[in-house]
Amino acid sequence: MRKEYTVIPEDAVVIGNRAYFTSSTYNGFFYSEVGEEYAQHIGAIPGEMINGERLYASLQSVDERFICMIPFTAKEIAVYDIINDSFFKIPLNDDMQEKTMKFMASAEVDGVVFAFGLFDTFVYKIDVYQNTCLKVCSWEEKLERSKVFDDNDAFFRYQTQLYDGKIYVPFCNANAVLIYDYKRNDCEIVVFDDLDNGYSGVWRNGEVFYFSPRKVGQRGLRWNIKNDSADYLADSDKNIIGLCTENNKVIYCSCDEFSFIRDDNLVYDTKEEIIRYYKTTNKNTWSVRVSEFIESKVDMKSIVCGKMVYETEWFKFGSYLNSISRIDEV
């Protein structure tokens, strides 16, 4: 009897030629050699439920030795020590620990990880060497509450951008971007206008930032930080979970197709086979859908975050898009 398991990645970091990632649908930590078909199961995160879903939404590499796992539903921060092949935990404060959903957006700078609360207004500083997670800055007084058009939505999703000593994080529920100056430990917020337009992801090309729309009917935005000019791109007819890039294209990542935004604002959908999923055949290994662009090198983290799902001959999914499938063959 052959048993094959399909693992849905939640987030990943690439260190050297190896991608480390967490499972979206249960408690599991894995690695895969980039370009290989199979993934290896490192282990379950200690102290978390084995069937816990979306435990860790964001991973950051620290000095290419530690992998810091920032919790989405998990109780604590988990850190994997690559050299010692071991886990250790960093506790959260009581207020954050009680939240059902905690973080998504994060960034690593000079060995320190900064995380941004999903439903609170603080920036957190995570130090894996000191085993601490501290509130270091609040942006609450920098944004008028009237600018937040959906109190039920999270403030931020996964993606951030580093530029000129600052971390840029787009709002999901405000037409704005948070700018955290980690050297001065200060927050600034730029509001674009009064439209109910939120963003799910960000990418930077030089001094130009691209923001992907959050929901159906909202629009992407192109922002030139040098001259502080912004213009909207086309409306989205889908919920977008982030963006990545390929050559001169900005790619909006939805769950069933890609929308390409060119620099001349031409928008089109494509069915072109640009994502490849590996077919697993080894009967004794864990397998993961590792995706890559055929024609160009793209940040694997952006792709894994996107969780693009196509039905293949070996992977079937039902109404719950991120469900896990097991294929048993006799």
Image (cartoon, rainbow, N blue to C red):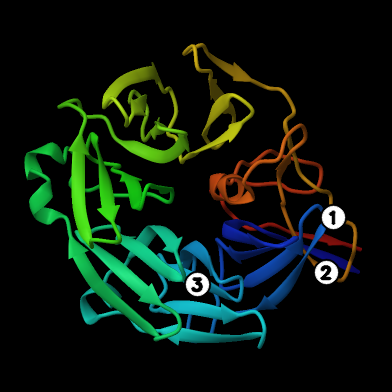
Q: Which residue is mark 1?
A: 280
On the question of residue 150 being in view, the answer is no
On the question of residue 221 being in view, the answer is yes
- Residue 105 screen position, x and y as percent: 39, 55
Q: Which residue is mark 2?
A: 285
Q: Quadrant of residue 185?
A: bottom left
* 2 or 3: mark nearer the eye: 3
Q: Badge 3 local density, few (<14 within 10 Å), some, or many (20+)?
A: many
CB atoms of marks 1 and 2 within 8 Å: yes
- Residue 287 screen position, x and y as percent: 77, 61
Q: Residue at x 16, y 55 (%)?
A: 139
Q: Residue at x 45, y 80 (%)?
A: 128
- Measure the C-alpha gap from mark 2 to mark 3: 25 Å
Q: Which mark is residue 231?
A: none
Q: Amino acid at mark 2?
A: Thr
The vertical placement of 186 against 179, above or below, is below
Q: Which mark is residue 68?
A: 3
Q: Quick one: label 2 or label 3, which is nearer the N terminus? A: 3
Q: Amino acid at mark 1?
A: Thr
